[in-house]
Image (cartoon, rainbow, N blue to C red):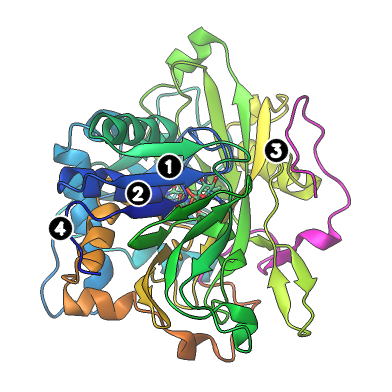
Amino acid sequence: SELSHSSSILIIGAGTWGVSTALHLARRGYTNVTVLDEYPQPSQISAGNDLNKISSFVNPPDESDKDYANQIFFAALSKGFKEDPIFQPHFHEVGIVMSALSPGGLQQIQKRNQEGFDMTELNEPEDFQKTMPSGILTGPVRGWKGFWRKNGAGWVHARNALLSAIVESQRLGVNFNCGYPQGKAVRLLHRNPDPTNNNGLTGDVIGVETQDNKRYFASRVILATGANSDQFLDFKKQLRPTAWTLAHIRMSPEEAKSYANLPVLFNADQGFFMEPDQDNHELKICDEHPGYCNWVIGADGERRSVPFARQQIPIESAKRIRALLRATMPQLADRPFSFARLCWCADTVDRNFLIDFHPDHPSLLLAVGASGRGFAHIPSIGGFIADRLEGRMEAKVAAAVRWRPEQALNRNWDDTLNRFGGQYKVMNLQEITEWTNIPNGYTESL
Ligand code: FAD
Ligand code: FSA
């Protein structure tokens, strides 16, 4: 049916992209938007439900830019964090120290569009130490090279930005149906399914069934379930659910103050951290690596990475986090972790997003494949998803984010996708036997 502002639109997943989409649709005047999520808001498994995320600005690209589509996305998020009152308060323009140890890591950090920003090269340990007040980077910072970008970059209070978008969407009339079992989508509903073809998963998508056996019908369905998306349909290997690891250290209020306003520190081989949040005085640290998959062999003999939620991390990852602290802030290296978790996202083959209608289900719009860099886009990605819904996404952008199974035909599941650190390979959670044992850490029953 033709799309109008009163069309029923169902968004599955109230994570980073689902919420951004809900907000943009509501702002455009859509009056019948419903969002489902299996967890109460903000979802504890959303990759965006996090203390902080890195974001940096770029200027609008020229038509001839080789990476035009991505630069368009980045230019839009830059505008959003500068101008949109829903997001602007959550962005902290503290700058970023980008660094690496390995030749590959160094090459990777140089690739970003940095024109027009205040940049300083960093070569010696003292150069790095001077990017923060004395007493913070007391570690050796040995062998690091990189640069300090003082403006147009920083961090977002991710959970607060997500909540801000949820509250504003609700104010504009979006209906959120979240929590278990009523918000958990279990399968897509099809019009005139043909039981002799593709297990009956044929015909257009007309809605979704939830865990409590209710059926939601809608004229358009937008799938925004992040790393869990490939349980709903065959993505033809276009998505690889992959997990990264994070831990928190709780500081005293005074300590948190003395670590305030630090630039983000990112090392492509070792990991990264940002200043502690000033409400709960928690410092988040990530070790950098090509990711963990949870490989299981399907009935077809193919490998599949199946996400599961766990608020613990492998001991080897905890050790890497402590190694990063010893290199940078050894005074914190032996503190207990107050929290840790696996954080799942889904990588496409080329790490471009996947925002397109499904070729066999014309009312199903896919908004997936955030590829481990989708949070920064929270102010703006929903606008692009809404453009696609309305059939007016710019052609060059639509081409980059199209349904593209041909790209995944011979997919190398072990591709590190220009990531470094850890064991310099994609790791397998099936092989992990030792996990942290942080009190009260939630583990999904498997
Ligand atoms: P999510 O935000 O994960 O949302 C998916 C939602 O779907 C969840 O709310 C979930 O509850 C819901 N859901 C799942 N299954 C169902 C179901 N069956 N029914 C109903 N609901 C369901 N990006 C950056 O830009 N900058 C960074 O610094 C950065 N750091 C990161 C650090 C880590 C450790 C990780 C893991 C990722 C990081 N990212 C970063 C990537 C970014 O977080 C993700 O790309 C982005 O949040 C993905 O958004 P999404 O909406 O696709 O998925
Ligand atoms: O600058 C960035 O976009 C950092 S994204 C942070 C991160 O943890 C990656 O370092 C990691 O490789 C993965 O993509 C998840 O997100």
User: What is the distance, in whole Å, between disc 2 and disc 3 at their CAs?
Assistant: 23 Å
Q: Position of residue 414 (x, y in %)?
A: 66, 76
Determine the CA span between mark 2 and mark 4.
15 Å
Task: Kindly tell me whether mark 4's CB lies below 8 Å from ligand 2.
Answer: no
Residue at disc 1, secondary structure? strand
Say what secondary structure mark 2 lies in.
Answer: helix
In the shown orientation, is residue 77 left or right of residue 192? Answer: left
Above or below residue 433? Residue 107 is below
Disc 4 target residue = 59
Location of mark 2 (residue): 376
Of marks 2 and 4, the one in the foreground: 2
Reply yes or no: does residue 419 show up in magenta. Answer: yes
Q: Which residue is mark 3?
A: 311
Any part of residue 118 in sight: no
Amino acid type, mark 3: Gln
Q: Residue at x 46, y 38 (%)?
A: 177
Labels 2 and 1: the sequence-earlier one = 1
The quarter of the picture where the N terminus appears is bottom left
Asked if disc 2 and disc 1 are in contact, CB closer than 8 Å, the reply is: yes
Q: Is residue 136 above or below residue 218?
A: above
On residue 53, the disc is 1
Residue at position x 65%, y 81% from top? 199
Q: Is mark 1 within 8 Å of ligand 1?
A: yes
**Amino acid type indicated by mark 2:** Ala
Percent across and percent down for residue 305 are 69, 67
For the residues marked 1 and 3, what is the alpha-carbon distance in whole angstroms?
A: 18 Å
Q: Residue 223 at what x, y percent from top left?
A: 44, 60
Comes first in the chain, label 1 or label 4: 1
The answer, for residue 345, to whether it is visible in the render is yes
In the picture shown, does residue 364 fall above or below 227?
below
Magenta residues? 418-446
Mark 2 crowd level (few <14, some 14–19, many ≥20, 10 Å Cα): many
